[in-house]
């Protein structure tokens, strides 16, 4: 006998009947994020290549492309497979990789999609060139330059030129541009400080481009940026492509930074949770904890009631494996027994690792489920 749990939700269900915890997307906010961001980026003559590591769903990626994206980014090679299988034809892997298993995945993907990859060392280029030639495929290669992240990427013009010469030595590889991403800039809280850091990153990227031009090397693509900096990156005159990922769904960390720009994406991602216990004054317990919420960016910063329910203001104060402690803000002695069974929407602090905990998005509009989208790249981190 085979036993499987019932579906948490079906299209057409009301939110009140959705099983919890469930990961939700508010379609009105989601669609506005895709539409407004694509228009803003295109208005500056820059290409939009969203980073799919944030949402890990081919259903989301295809909608981003329909809205104007030129393709997607993935962080890992295995992560790219579901997107390729779903029909995404232009994929850029924004992470260096080594090893025969990774080379095998890269050449297999390159036989199905237009594949771009990232390098920052000579052995990566040599191994990739040999593997691509053996497989009879062509791969676009973007050396990564360090523009302030102090993580991956070459740090000198000479090191970059050596990589480009090595790429040119392999007929199966094509120098396609530069990877110039500054992840540390994305969550700087103050708008002015974030703008300053992004500007310095763009200036550094520009210095590498000028060094290539002096050598007679044309750099057609400079790609980088993210949700926190794309408004600055598109106006820099350096970036030809930006890679925001979280903008489609957002989270508490991005919601907490200062925004002044013309486009401010709205939070569309929530975890629907049920209050499962309410025996203590001023406190209640919901059914989502560490196994349903990433807390690397801190505890959830916002808890709201669903449209069909209302109650006192709540704060998420502690997470255990399967429990979330809620307190009534400003009313430590209030009776909470009447809250038992009610539903709340919890805004995750960090979307990427939270999404990786779920198999599907329950997509809703108003108080009704409109669609179920699989998170088909979850767990794919090779």
Image: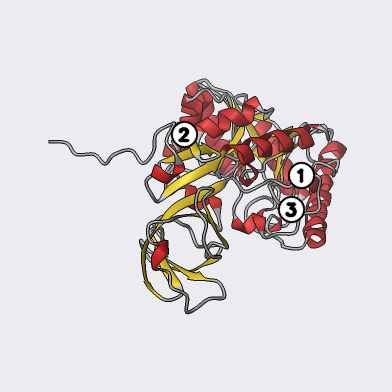
Q: Is residue 202 left or right of residue 1?
A: right
Q: Quadrant of the N terminus?
A: top left
State the residue at coordinates (46%, 50%).
272
x, y percentage for residue 353? Answer: 49, 52
What residue sits right under mark 1 in the picture? 263
State the residue at coordinates (55%, 23%).
113
Q: Quadrant of the C terminus?
A: top left
- Furthest-left residue in this view: 1
x, y percentage for residue 224? Answer: 70, 44
Instruction: Indicate which label's residue lies in the foreground, 1 or 3.
Output: 1
State the residue at coordinates (77%, 58%).
194
Q: Circle 2 — which element? A: strand
What residue sits right under mark 2 in the picture? 373
Q: Circle 3 — which element? A: loop
Q: Is residue 44 above or below residue 121?
A: above
What residue sits right under mark 3 in the picture? 147
């Amino acid at each position: 006998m085979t036993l499987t749990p019932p579906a948490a939700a079906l299209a057409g269900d009301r939110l009140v009947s959705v099983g919890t915890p469930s990961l939700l997307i508010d379609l009105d906010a989601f669609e506005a994020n895709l539409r407004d961001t694509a228009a803003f980026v295109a208005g500056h003559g820059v290409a939009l290549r969203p980073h799919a590591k944030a949402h890990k769903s081919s259903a989301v990626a295809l909608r981003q492309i329909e809205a104007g994206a030129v393709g997607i980014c993935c962080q890992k090679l295995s992560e790219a497979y579901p997107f390729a299988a779903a029909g995404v034809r232009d994929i850029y892997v924004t992470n260096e990789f080594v090893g025969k298993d990774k080379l095998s995945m890269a050449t297999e993907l390159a036989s199905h999609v237009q594949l771009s990859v990232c390098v920052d060392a000579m052995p990566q280029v040599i191994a990739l060139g040999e593997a691509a030639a053996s497989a009879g495929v062509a791969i676009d290669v973007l050396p990564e330059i360090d523009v302030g992240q102090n993580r991956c990427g070459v740090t000198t013009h000479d090191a970059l030129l050596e990589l480009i010469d090595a790429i040119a030595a392999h007929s199966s590889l094509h120098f396609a541009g530069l990877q110039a991403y500054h992840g540390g800039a994305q969550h700087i809280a103050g708008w002015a400080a974030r703008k300053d850091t992004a500007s310095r990153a763009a200036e550094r990227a520009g210095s590498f481009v000028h060094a290539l031009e002096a050598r007679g090397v044309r750099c057609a693509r400079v790609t980088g940026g993210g949700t926190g900096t794309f408004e600055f990156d598109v106006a820099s005159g350096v970036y030809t492509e930006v890679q925001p990922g979280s903008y489609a769904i957002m989270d508490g960390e991005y919601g907490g930074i200062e925004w002044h720009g013309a486009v401010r994406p709205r939070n569309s991602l929530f975890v629907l949770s049920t209050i499962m216990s309410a025996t203590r004054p001023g406190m209640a317990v919901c059914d989502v904890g560490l196994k349903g919420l990433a807390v690397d960016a801190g505890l959830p910063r916002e808890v709201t009631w669903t449209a069909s329910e209302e109650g006192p203001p709540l704060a998420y104060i502690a997470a255990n494996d399967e429990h979330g402690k809620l307190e009534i803000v400003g009313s430590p002695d209030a009776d909470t027994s009447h809250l038992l069974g009610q539903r709340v929407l919890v805004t995750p602090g960090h979307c990427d690792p939270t999404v990786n905990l779920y198999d599907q998005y329950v997509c809703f509009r108003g108080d009704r489920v409109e669609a179920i989208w699989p998170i088909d790249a979850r767990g794919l981190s090779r």
